[in-house]
Image (cartoon, rainbow, N blue to C red):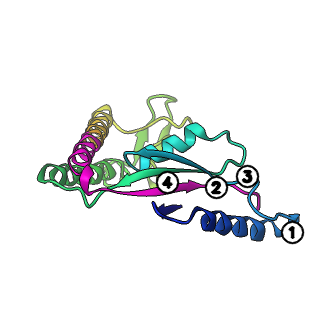
Amino acid sequence: MTYPENVNKKSVQQEWDSAAACAGKKEGASGLDKDIQWYDHICDNYEEAEEFITQHDSGWYDQLAVKYRTYPELSSKKMTDMKNRLEKAKARLDELNGFHFANAKSQYVGCKKCGSKLSLRYMKSNYCPLCKADLRPESKLASIKSVEDKIYKLALDIGKEERLLEKKSKAKSTVQWLVKVEYHS
């Protein structure tokens, strides 16, 4: 859950103690097992705050909070262009991953792995129902791999551009708390 930087920490603790008590009422719960541990550290973004909490979490009902920066809508012409290209690439991947044999003229397809002859009338996926091998041609698989690589690279480039824009707009950022609680219900 996120809260403003100047939130009353005692009220957040009470809020989550009440939630834990309600959820565990049948088992006699009276609140969280531990108090929320508030780290006075500021992460550059939400993802870094999640990572910080993951690294400090023992995995046993820890209650943790850390600050992170939020930025006004970060945008640039380059960012908009990359996001548009990413959406087009995702649409292309969905198209390529559709049922390959939907408009096939032949009635049967052969599996190169197990040698089965399969009737397309009963096929609903691109995989052999017997050995699970992909039945699509190598050229189609290469096209899919190429688009997946493009999506991966665009996602990395978008992340780099976001971090660059975050650095430029640090003065305009606000700080919030990311709070993670665990309780038995």
Asked whether the residues under the numbered discs 1 and 3 touch, taking CB atoms below 8 Å apart as contact, a structural biologist would say no
Going from N to C along the chain, the mark reached first, 1 or 3, is 1
Q: Which residue is drawn at 52% across and 29% down?
A: 114
- Relative side of 46 to 74, left or right: right
Going from N to C along the chain, the mark reached first, 1 or 2, is 1
Q: What residue type is labelled 3?
A: Lys
Q: Which amino acid does label 1 sit on?
A: Lys
Above or below for 153 versus 24: above
Q: Which amino acid does label 2 sit on?
A: Val
Asked whether the residues under the numbered discs 2 and 3 touch, taking CB atoms below 8 Å apart as contact, a structural biologist would say no
Which of the two discs, 2 and 3, sits closer to the camera? 3
> Mark 1 — residue?
26
How far apart in space, not on screen, are marks 1 and 4 (Cα)?
52 Å
> Mark 3 — residue?
34
How far apart in space, not on screen, are marks 4 and 2 (Cα)?
49 Å
Which of the two discs, 3 and 4, sits closer to the camera? 3
Question: Magenta span covers which residues?
Answer: 157-185
- Within 10 angstroms of label 4, few (less than 14), some, or many (20 or more) residues? few
On residue 181, the disc is 2
How far apart in space, not on screen, are marks 2 and 3 (Cα)?
9 Å
User: In the figure, residue 27 lies in which quadrant?
Assistant: bottom right
Q: Does the magenta stretch include residue 69?
A: no
- Within 10 angstroms of label 3, few (less than 14), some, or many (20 or more) residues? some
Q: Is mark 4 on a helix, strand or loop?
A: helix
Residue 33 at x, y percent in the picture: 76, 54
> Mark 4 — residue?
122
